């Protein structure tokens, strides 16, 4: 028969196994915490550099975007190309605009109507770019309002932006805003993420 170990020896071996198990649990918990921190850091990095979820605040982009919806903006969209007509973009207005209006310094969401070098004007309530009336299927007739734009050439390296709800939108038509420099266009709106039942591409 195999030699029986004393009770004290068995107790010491059990204590060593318990210590080893406790150490293993501690390291597994620490590993999980490290992975969790890394995931959070990656998510914040993606938000800051690639995709930015932004809540729509206001009614200036009705009916394309509804107040309270969460849209996703692609911050890499204009890394190697410039915005084009029809793009819905996130941009910063001139610094003076926020100070004059006593508003929080934050991005605005608008639609690019004309780019640098284009001529833009309104005739009989319709928008003309380079002498041609543009098709605006996203624009509801009851949201046009008084969208008077005197004939002008959009400066180089800027974009002329308007809200889809022209009746209430404060945009490039106003002297306090004007055409937006490309360096202040920070992303292209790709889709509406929330609420889920309203999920759609923009």
Image (cartoon, rainbow, N blue to C red):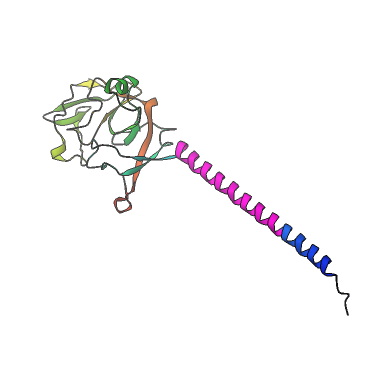
Q: Is residue 42 or residue 63 the one in the foreground? A: 42
- Please name whichever residue, 154 or 57, is drawn nearer the observer in this view of the structure: 57
Q: Report x, y in % for residue 202.
A: 31, 44
**Image point (19%, 33%), residue name:** 166
Q: How many marks?
A: 0
Query: Where is the N terminus found, in terms of image quarters?
Result: bottom right
Which sits in the foreground, 158 or 14? 14
Point out the residue furthest to the left here.
124
Magenta-drawn segment: 21-49
Find residue 161 and report its image quarter: top left
Residue at position x 46%, y 36% in the image:
48
Which residue ends up furthest to the front in the rendered image?
A: 8
The residue lying toward the viewer, choosing from 65 and 135, is 65
Secondary structure predominantly adopted by residues drawn in magenta: helix
- On the rendered structure, is 37 left or right of 101? right
Where residue 200 sits: x, y (%)?
31, 49
Residue 27 in the image: above or below residue 77? below
Give above or below for 2 relative to 149: below
At horizontal 69% and vertical 57% (from top left) the residue drawn is: 22
Q: Position of residue 15 (x, y in %)?
A: 76, 61
Q: Based on the displayed image, in which of its 4 quarters is residue 143 positioned?
A: top left
Q: Is residue 44 magenta?
A: yes
Residue 138 shown in magenta: no
Picture coordinates of residue 139 (x, y %)? 19, 39
Q: Quadrant of residue 160?
A: top left
- Residue for point 13% across, 30% down: 125
17 above or below 170?
A: below
Would you say 114 lies left or right of 39 here?
left
């Amino acid at each position: 028969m195999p030699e029986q170990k004393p009770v004290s020896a068995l107790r010491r071996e059990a204590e060593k196994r318990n210590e080893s198990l406790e150490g293993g649990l501690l390291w597994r918990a620490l590993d999980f915490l490290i992975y969790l921190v890394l995931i959070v850091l990656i998510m914040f990095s993606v938000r800051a550099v690639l995709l930015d979820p932004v809540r729509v605040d206001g009614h200036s982009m009705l009916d394309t975007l509804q107040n309270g919806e969460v849209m996703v903006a692609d911050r890499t969209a204009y890394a190697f190309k410039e915005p084009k007509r029809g793009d819905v973009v996130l941009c910063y207005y001139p610094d003076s605009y926020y100070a004059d209006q006593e508003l929080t310094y934050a991005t605005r969401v608008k639609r690019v109507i004309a780019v640098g070098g284009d001529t833009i004007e309104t005739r009989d309530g319709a928008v003309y770019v380079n002498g041609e009336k543009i098709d605006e299927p996203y624009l509801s007739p009851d949201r046009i309002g008084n969208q008077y734009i005197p004939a002008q050439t959009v400066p180089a390296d800027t974009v002329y932006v308007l809200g889809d709800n022209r009746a209430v939108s404060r945009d490039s038509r106003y002297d306090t805003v004007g055409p937006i420099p490309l360096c202040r266009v920070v992303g292209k709106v790709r889709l509406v993420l929330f609420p889920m039942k309203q999920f759609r591409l923009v």
